[in-house]
Amino acid sequence: MTKQAAPSSKTRAMRELAELIRGRRTINLFLQTPVPRNLVRDAVEAATWAPNHYVTEPWRFYLLGPEAIGRCIDLVRDIVTAEKDAKAGAFKARNWAQKPGWLVVTCQRSEDDRRQREDYAACSAAVQNLMLYLWQAGVGSKWTTGDITRDARFEEIVGFDSDRETVVGLFWYGYPKLTPEQKRRDVGELLIERP
Ligand SMILES: Cc1cc2nc3c(=O)[nH]c(=O)nc-3n(C[C@H](O)[C@H](O)[C@H](O)COP(=O)(O)O)c2cc1C
């Protein structure tokens, strides 16, 4: 019989898992090395094992190809040009053209408020699964909810119906060029223990 680890002692697997979770960072700068499509497919498959109340499986994943990506870049140029000016629009478009992988995650809409909140929560859990799976393979990502994700033209490019689905985020992914640092508050400030 294998000896059970005492509850407080950390096994190597636990330490590695914590390191993976802690080490994942939002990536802004990516290398141009393409990420294998199968890896993304496996990450999406892993994502779908997130908890989801009533097993609604509310998530949908849209993997964009070069044509759709090009149209998103044109769209962000138009949005920023209209909001600011052509120079800012061109700058943004150049920046977005450096994002190697594009994945849009949506959540099925529900008439029921509580179901909608729970489904969004489930989608967030799925997204974390996805990002961690990719991170373990050396692939970073960035979750964005910028203006483009609320634009009707984006809906048309991605090809979903906003009456039925709401955008959880646009995710860029790729091998990190630079991994930023982050801090978190000490758990002692956040974990409130009650007798
Ligand atoms: C719902 C959601 C939306 C986000 N949208 C944006 C965004 O529009 N732009 C951005 O720069 N980061 C966005 N982020 C990423 C956060 O800024 C990032 O997670 C935070 O800075 C902590 O960094 P870390 O992911 O490296 O821990 C978003 C994160 C979440 C959870």
Image (cartoon, rainbow, N blue to C red):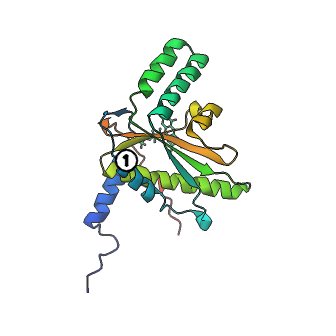
Find residue 163 and report its horizontal and vertical position in percent.
70, 45
Task: Judge whether 147 appears above or below 20 on screen.
Answer: above
Residue 63 located left or right of residue 162: left
Looking at the image, is 189 positioned above or below residue 30? below
Foreground of the two, 35 or 24: 35
Q: Quadrant of the N terminus?
A: bottom left
Q: Residue at x 38, y 52 (%)?
A: 132
Residue to which mark 1 is pinned: 37
> What amino acid is at disc 1?
Arg
Locate residue 179: give its quadrant. top left
Q: Is residue 190 visible in the rendered structure shown here? A: yes
The reply to whether residue 178 is in sight is no
Q: Residue at x 67, y 58 (%)?
A: 115
Name which residue lies at 59% across and 41% down. Answer: 159
All told, the count of numbered labels is 1
Identify the element where label 1 is drawn. Answer: helix
Does residue 87 sit above or below 187 in this rendering?
above
Front-most of 167 and 156?
Answer: 156
Q: Residues within 10 Å of mark 1 (few under 14, many from 20)?
A: few
Q: Position of residue 152 (x, y in %)?
A: 65, 33
* Front-lying residue, 21 or 173: 173
Identity of the residue furthest to the right in this view: 111
Residue 111 location (% of width, % of height): 74, 54
| Residue 177 picture location, percent across and down | 30, 34
Give me the residue at 57% from left, 21% from top. Answer: 78
